[in-house]
Image (cartoon, rainbow, N blue to C red):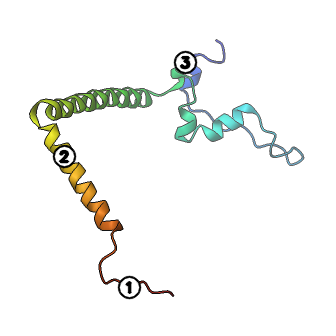
Amino acid sequence: MSDGDGDEANQEAEPPEAPEADEEAEVESDEAALWHFGRYRESRLALPWEQWSFREKANFCMDRLFLGFLAIFLLLLFSEVCYKMWYVTNVRKIAAFLKDSSTGLFGWLFAQEEGEELFEL
């Protein structure tokens, strides 16, 4: 069998031997690096699909399915909101209200009250 067959990939990998004291700690084999980083989820996603466990594959598929339903739900929700705004509500009244309220708000914010004195600190 070759090195990448499924039988060997499914077995629990044992850690390779630690490097000798005279070797630099930065220089490690690829197997040692894969064994070390394989314990973390981020590096597990970097492995080929064939080396994922059934649980990881199932979680990945369920996550993609959920994201698909979420995208469809948000699209339908947005289309319903657009429909309600266009056909049900009176857009002219809403626009006039927003214009009047924003004009009143800005006028109130930037107006100086009568009798207000400016103090220098």
Is the residue 87 above or below the residue 121 in the image?
above
In this orientation, which residue lies closer to the viewer: 13 or 79?
79
Residue 58 picture quarter: top left
Q: Which secondary structure, mark 1? A: loop
x, y (%) of residue 7?
Answer: 55, 19
Q: Which residue is mark 1?
A: 117
Q: Residue at x 30, y 63 (%)?
A: 107
In whole angstroms, how far apart are the C-alphas of marks 1 and 3? Answer: 83 Å
Q: Which residue is mark 2?
A: 96
Q: Which secondary structure, mark 3? A: helix
Pointer 1 and pointer 3: residues touching (CB < 8 Å)? no
**Residue extending furthest toward the right:** 22
In this orientation, which residue lies closer to the viewer: 115 or 28?
115
Q: Residue at x 38, y 85 (%)?
A: 117
Is the residue 84 above or below the residue 98 in the image?
above
Locate the N terminus by quadrant: top right
Labelled disc at residue 11: none
Disc 3 packing (10 Å; few <14; some 14–19; many ≥20): few
Which residue type does callout 2 highlight? Ala
Which residue type does callout 1 highlight? Glu
